[in-house]
Amino acid sequence: MMRNTLVGTLFLLFTIGGCSGTQKAGMSSPEKVSTDTQTLLGYQDEIDIGYLKPHLSAFSADSMEGRETGMKGQKKAADYLVTQYKKMGLKPIVEEDSYLQKFKVNATRDDSIVFTITAKDINGTTPADRSVIRENSTANFIPQFSRGDTLDGEIVFVGYGVSNKLDINQLQGQDLQDKWVLAFNNAPQVIDGDTLYKDHQEFYRAWMTGLLQQGVKGVLTIPEITPEEFYTKAEEQNVAFGKPTGMKLAYLDEGQEPQGPSLGINTIAPQTAAELLDLENLAELNNKREDIARNMDKFNAQKTGYELSQISYNTDVKLGSENVMAFLEGGDPELKDEVVVIYSHYDHLGIGKPDSTGDNIYNGADDDGSGVIGTLNIAKSFAEAAEDGVRPRRSILFLNVSGEEKGLLGSRFYSDHPVIPIEKTITNINVDMIGRLDPAHEEKGVEDYSYIIGSKLISSELDSLLHVANERSGKIELSEKYNDLNDPNQFYRRSDHWNFGRLGIPFIFFFTGVHEDYHQPSDEVDKIHFQKMQKIVRTMYATVVMVANADESPKVDNQEFIEITKEG
């Protein structure tokens, strides 16, 4: 086995390109183009912390306002990238000699939500409570999910939403169709020595599925927090009001009807829940919580005698966003019509909920500033090689997409509207979050690694090219931990590369894992491990060289992946 692997590696080394030294080619005549692999690999020395650090510092600065899709900060980030590509001398490739591929997005802006509780008795209904969420005011409810402008229904108390220690949603006593259900959160995990569910998320999914199957109008969860804590959380959540949400690509959204039933999911203020249950104070509410937990199998759902009306007022919003791209033409007359796409998403979360320090700008230095500046340095290396008369055999498209955080919007748009035919796109290399350590590697003290997702899941040839490239560049640990079609995280379809993978294009995704600052304002440039990032980017650069210079493009040869893409 070892001998066969070595022979295959040596074969790749001598068929991908010549071995004429590691220096740059100082070719004075632009008509003379070299496509020598070894010479191209020498330009990985241009990938340097001296370039990465200042550019990532600028790209993830507060002045970029978190680069949220469709917002001013994202436009500033796009301008920054265009400026860099122009300085490199890379060509625009979109219509009218533009570096920007523009697309339209439909969104919704939440203006206010009005919650009205009324009491039902023999005389009819009596208003009991009314509260309104606006941009600068909170209510007695914190919305978690909402579909439908108006949600009306009786409120039924269901305890924990579990009738006994092993059955979820087998509630007795009430028909829950079109009702709001009021429930304590955090059902006990173990009752009488039996495990109710493996973890909270597993329980929550099963619990919510059971309620939906019973046709509820909405869910009101009662948290175990003080009123002060509740309203602090309510104020933090209010940052979403007045901002566009629920972004969808306009060309896919037009004429589409909302999917699924009308439904609301809210956290309710503890004192409001106590009033609905006719309890005197929060102490009585906590006693009730504990009593039901001790007697789960004796609890029956019961009417509260109250109704809830939730009315949402919102405005349809149309936004524009942009993918940024630059092009390097290949040097082989027979292969330059084929392209390797290397890309990263340059959007992030914008300005939002403040952290404990009061910081509310989500800078996204790692997510995905690290990937963007890494690909920018790769572009610079290829541009400098081209200036010296050295080009890869195939062409390279440098693509920075927006809308990833909103649902892979930019990459989906490009894959449906490619500037280079999809059949001429031979490989996609994607990078997202390569500047930090995840807890597993931090504990082991291992810095120089990257998770590799894709490659041999799709193409054994692409995987071989990757490993040869790594040995001739960064020599990082290539972890296969998530490189599994059955991995529960499903990373192979959760980032932008999937919009190429679904079309049967081989891809490699470079990713170093989630860390404590993921999607937090604290994802700042001063926490980036630049030496580690440099090595990963060099491996990426070398991989692009190997793929672009290979005699044959990588073939998709994993039948399981082929079947999955057909199903998709």
Image (spheres, rainbow, N blue to C red):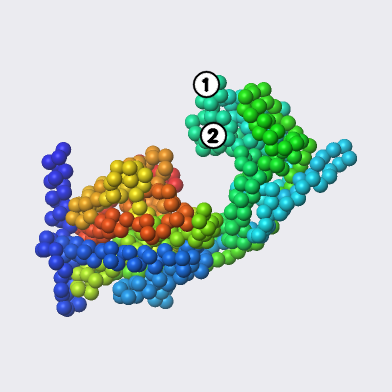
Badge count: 2
Q: Amino acid at mark 1?
A: Gly
Identify the residue under disc 2. 203
Image coords of residue 327 (percent x, y): 33, 69
Position above or below: 26 against 178:
below
Position above or below: 14 against 183:
below
Give the class, few, some or many, for how many residues have Cα within 10 Å of label 2's Cα (few <14, many ≥20).
some
Sequence-first disc among 1 and 2: 1
Residue located at (69% from left, 27% from top): 300
Residue located at (50% from left, 56% from top): 357
Element class at badge 2: helix
In this image, 453 relative to 315: left or right? left
Identify the residue under disc 1. 193
Near-viewer residue (116 or 107): 116
Q: CA distance from mark 1 to mark 2?
A: 17 Å
Q: Is residue 416 visible?
A: no
In this image, 65 relative to 160: left or right? left
Which quadrant does the N terminus fall into?
top left
Where residue 176 sits, quadrant-wise, is top right
**Given the current orientation, which residue lies at the most extreme right position?**
123
Residue located at (72% from left, 50% from top): 115
Image coords of residue 514 (percent x, y): 40, 48
Q: Amino acid at mark 2?
A: Phe
**Given the current orientation, which residue lies at the most extreme left position?**
20
Position above or below: 72 against 540:
below
In this image, 254 relative to 288: left or right? left
Give the class, few, some or many, for how many residues have Cα within 10 Å of label 1's Cα (few <14, many ≥20).
few
Q: Is residue 226 visible?
A: yes
Mark 1 touches mark 2? (CB < 8 Å): no
